[in-house]
Image (spheres, helix red, strand yellow):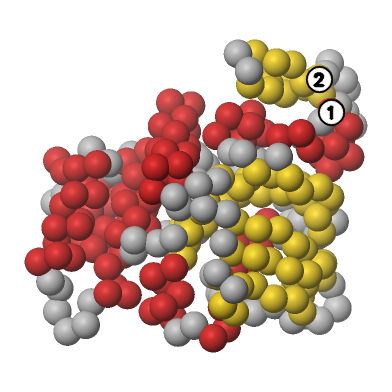
């Protein structure tokens, strides 16, 4: 389990981007990190992956402080997929192979190549192995990025807006695969999302952020019309459809 306890972070030591944030990323669960732009969602992922160093609080992986881990040790535990990643003039096979970097000692092993080959097959990317990334569609590119992350064989997967610029089918396909990874491979997943309905469909833990801190944290029970109004300033109705919550905006005029 990744435990985030009372985390605070600032770029300038004056304005807190994260203010006393606490939550957990648990194996076999998908945590949706939700909130308006600028509340610190992406910054939280970068602190967990030690791209940024928090000024206060702690982050532990299975009771081990992340600051005590080397970069290679951390990369074997956590795979992080940012909003924009991978150079475009790289072949698909090589891009996925980059995920094996924490394990490569002197040269690429047969095991490294086999892991990449298996992942390309699982993501239906075998036919694209020799193609360059700039020749792929958005959905294909996102599959490559996820395959590279899984090549790290991580215990935890951090995804920053993985459905951006994807059509509805690819959004569902990517998140369904991530959900299956969590459940079947016992991986703990944290996902920054803007689509609340996608979050409710594919995630089972939720962190609502407002003003750089935690507004609510827990199961789907915290996703209420009142909470959404408080966090997003959006009036909605929540209905049930096939045992799934659906969020429907109310017919309200907003000042533009």
In what quadrant of the picture does the N terminus appear? Answer: bottom right
Q: CA distance from mark 2 to mark 1?
A: 6 Å
Q: Is disc 2 placed on a helix, strand or loop?
A: strand
- Depth order, front residue of 185/238: 185
Which residue lies most toward the left here?
110
Q: Are marks 2 and 1 in contact (CB under 8 Å)?
A: yes
Assess disc 1: are there few (<14), some (14-19) or many (≥20) residues with their C-alpha within 10 Å of its C-alpha: some
242 shown above or below 83? above
Residue drawn at (84%, 50%) of the image: 215
* Residue 89 appearing in the image: no
- Depth order, front residue of 205/15: 205
Residue drawn at (55%, 46%) of the image: 29
Q: Is disc 1 placed on a helix, strand or loop?
A: helix
Q: Is tag 2's residue or tag 1's residue first in the polypeptide sequence?
A: 1
Q: Left of 191 or right of it: where is 110?
A: left
Residue 100 appears in which quarter of the rendering? bottom left
Location of residue 101 in the rendering, given as x and y in whole percent from the top left corner: 29, 73
Q: Left of 182 or right of it: where is 243?
A: right
* Residue 113 appearing in the image: yes
What count of labels does the image hold? Answer: 2
Residue drawn at (55%, 70%) of the image: 61
- Depth order, front residue of 240/197: 240
Which mark is drawn over residue 36? none
246 shown above or below 148? above
Question: Which residue is labeled 2 in the image?
Answer: 237
Residue drawn at (34%, 61%) of the image: 153
Assess disc 2: are there few (<14), some (14-19) or many (≥20) residues with their C-alpha within 10 Å of its C-alpha: some
201 shown above or below 73? above
Residue 236 appears in which quarter of the rendering? top right
Location of residue 179 in the rendering, given as x and y in whole percent from the top left corner: 47, 39
Which mark is drawn over residue 225? 1
């Amino acid at each position: 389990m990744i435990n985030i306890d009372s985390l605070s972070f600032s770029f300038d030591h004056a304005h807190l981007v994260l203010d006393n944030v606490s939550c957990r990323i648990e194996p076999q669960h998908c945590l949706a990190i939700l909130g308006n732009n600028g509340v610190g969602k992406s910054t939280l992922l970068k602190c967990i992956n030690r791209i940024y160093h928090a000024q206060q609080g702690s982050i532990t992986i299975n009771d081990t402080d992340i600051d005590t881990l080397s970069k290679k040790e951390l990369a074997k535990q956590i795979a992080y997929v940012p909003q924009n990643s991978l150079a475009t003039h790289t072949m698909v096979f090589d891009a996925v192979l980059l995920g094996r970097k924490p394990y490569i000692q002197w040269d690429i092993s047969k095991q490294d190549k086999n892991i990449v080959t298996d992942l390309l097959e699982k993501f239906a990317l075998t036919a694209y192995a020799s193609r360059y990334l700039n020749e792929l569609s958005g959905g294909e590119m996102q599959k490559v990025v996820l395959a590279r992350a899984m090549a790290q064989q991580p215990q935890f997967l951090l995804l920053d807006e993985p459905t951006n610029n994807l059509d509805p089918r690819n959004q569902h396909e990517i998140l369904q695969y991530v959900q299956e990874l969590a459940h079947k491979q016992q991986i703990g997943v944290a996902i920054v999302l803007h689509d609340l309905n996608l979050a409710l469909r594919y995630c089972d833990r939720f962190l609502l952020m407002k003003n750089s801190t935690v507004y609510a944290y827990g199961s789907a029970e915290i996703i209420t019309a009142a909470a959404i109004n408080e966090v997003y300033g959006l009036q909605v109705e929540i209905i049930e459809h096939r045992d799934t919550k659906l969020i429907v905006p109310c017919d309200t005029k907003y000042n533009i």
